[in-house]
Image (cartoon, coloured by chain):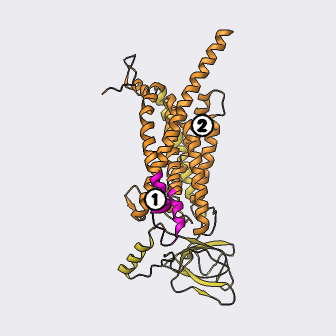
Amino acid sequence: MKVKTFRLTLLLSALAAASSAVALALYILGDQLVYYYVPSDIDPHQLPARTLRLGGLVEEGSLTQHHDSEALAFYITDLKTRLPVVFRGIPPALFQEGRGVVAEGRFRTDGTFQASLILAKHDETYMPPYVAKSLQAQHDTPTDTPYDN
Amino acid sequence: MTMPHTPARKKTASPAASLWHWFTPTYFRAVSGRVTPIALVLLLVTLPTGLAYAFFLSPPDYLQGETVRIMYIHVPSAWLALALYGAIAVASGITLTLKLPMAGHFATAASPVGACFTAIALISGSLWGKPTWGTYWVWDARLTSMLVLFFFYLAHSAMTQAFKQQERGQQAASILAIVGALNLPIIKWSVEWWHTLHQPESISFINPSSHIDISMLIPLGLMTVALFSYATIVITARMKLAILQQKWQSLLYQKTRNRS
């Protein structure tokens, strides 16, 4: 075997070994590597006691705010299951009904998720306000355009 | 077709040797003499127009408003950081197997440039995260794997300089670069494999599609060409410098040997 061929074979087999090690590690760690769980991941009969992050969409029409306190209540949905969430504080500007959200906190004994942190998750779509408006006119869907001037 | 700067080959050679010829410093000087002006023209055209579009001519986003303009520096920087690392990994494979000197010079020259653009992607992303997500940083799979890329770049840069003999350093760094390349698919598909706070990719090159309006794609494309041209110019210049330094050092070595 020529020296160069030998080096190449050695390199490729080392690379194959290393990548299978990484692939295996990722496969085993798979569930641990998620940043948040969706409502369907949570067993309603066995709510986890630890602090965790819950993600999904803020269900349309579910958002309520108490007048006196800054408490927000809404449902997080993954369009299969939904879970009630309460939060006291000011959410990020992009937090709205029908949009993505990640809430960090823990379940109370009554099954409500008490969030201590709310993060807005946005999707991969970018467009100017006028395009969003014309899409809204075409489909008659409630596309919010909070940024509009 | 003959290139005016290409030196006439001295020996009649096998295909492997002619591949060697392609990667010699002499040939590199001829190619870089043509590539650099083209990249410079591209940069001078795309950077001003790209910035003008990014800051003034492109519309705000329907959700994010003006902060969407961070995308025009964040996304091209991240693409460049990934592309450069991929190129360094390929060059490292060539360094280890075929031992072509220009491959090592390329990896050494490109590494700090890639580190800079990884840092730009991380910092601009952080500044973009605060007004949109509500946080500067989260340890989700995309952000963490990108930070790992930054550390691989730093380690690679350091290792190329870690040995007195440059060649030894480049070989050691090559192994690191190839191992680190396993991180590239993780970065790319992290947003699909796991739930991340970072949104999925807007543009797919595999089956061409885009979730970005055309008015925003124009500045994104211009800035991408600008940054890639800039990287080409800088890396080529650094490679030229490396060749000169090597020549200088061998001259010094000869001189000291003659004296003693």
Residue A108 vs B189, above or below: the answer is below
Chain A tint as drawn: yellow
Label 2 is placed on what type of residue?
Ala
Asked if marks 2 and 1 touch (Cβ < 8 Å), the reply is no
Q: Is residue A99 visible?
A: yes
Q: Chain of mark 2?
A: B
Q: Determine if the magenta segment contains residue B216.
A: no
Disc 2 and disc 1: Cα gap in Å? Answer: 39 Å
Residue B141 vs B89, above or below: the answer is below
Classed neighbour count for the residue bearing mark 2: other residues with Cα under 10 Å, few (<14), some (14–19), many (≥20): many
- Please report the bounds of the magenta region as a residue range: B48-72
Residue in the image at 61% along x and 40% along y: B156
Q: Which mark is residue B80?
A: none
Residue in the image at 63% along x and 76% along y: A91
Residue that carries the numbered disc 1 in the rendered image: B53
Residue that carries the numbered disc 2 in the rendered image: B173
- Observer-nearest of B68 and B90: B68
Q: Element at badge 2?
A: helix
Question: Residue B161, percent across and down?
Answer: 64, 34
Point out the frontmost of discs 2 and 1: 1
Label 1 is placed on what type of residue?
Tyr
The chain drawn orange is chain what?
Answer: B
**Tag 1 or tag 2, which sits nearer the N-term?**
1
- Observer-nearest of B78 and B42: B42
Q: Element at badge 1?
A: helix
Question: Residue A17, percent across and down?
Answer: 54, 44
